[in-house]
Amino acid sequence: MSAPPNSAAQLRQRLRPWVLFFDLNAVSLPISLSDATYRINQNLHYFFPNYALVILLVLFLSLIYHPLSLIVFLVIFAGWVYLYFSRSSDDPLVILNFEIGDKFVLGFLSLVTLVALFFTKVWVNIIVSLVIGAVIISIHAALRAPEEDVEGSPYGSLLSDVASPQGDYIRV
């Protein structure tokens, strides 16, 4: 009989280190709108669990003055930790011999969170919190240079050399 998985260890495996998340050396202004959208796309994939926790933290802070909503939120947060963050990507959720994917779990937990908080009559706080969280995430994702090499960029050498806007093109 195997030991139950350690939720804290699995959570740490999915989250990127917060030191890496808040690394000021990786922050720079994007050189173009294309570079900003590329950075946002890459960072959303790379830091997705961290961004989800940032959104949940902003929601939590907005509900401090609504104790009933806060209790509901904490119960739902425990569901998030158990059903989404504590599982590894190799360990699918199985209910009644049906394998449930991460995207479905994410959608279901998001829906349950929004419905429960809507019925506690704090939907204005929720919307404002989600907008604030989205702005925070967008700013972080646009300003943080992705970990990947620029060669993985769909823009190729156009982003590799800021001093030469021509990239690898040859003048004819």
Image (cartoon, grey):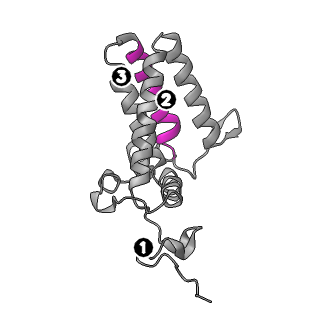
Which badge, 1 or 3, comes first in the chain's sequence?
3
Marks 3 and 2 sit apart, C-alpha to C-alpha, by 19 Å
Marks 1 and 3 sit apart, C-alpha to C-alpha, by 41 Å
Residue stretch in magenta: 69-87
- Mark 3 and mark 2 residues within 8 Å of each other at the beta carbon: no
The residue under label 2 is which amino acid type?
Gly
**Relative vertical location of residue 152 with respect to residue 21 in this rendering, above or below:** below
- Asked if residue 6 shows in the view, the reply is no
Q: Residue at position x 33%, y 61% from top?
A: 26
Callout count: 3
Give percent across and percent down for residue 116.
52, 17
Mark 1 vs mark 2: give the one in front.
1
Give percent across and percent down for residue 119.
53, 11
Provide the residue designation for mark 1. Answer: 162
Mark 3 vs mark 2: give the one in front.
3
Q: Which mark is residue 69?
A: none
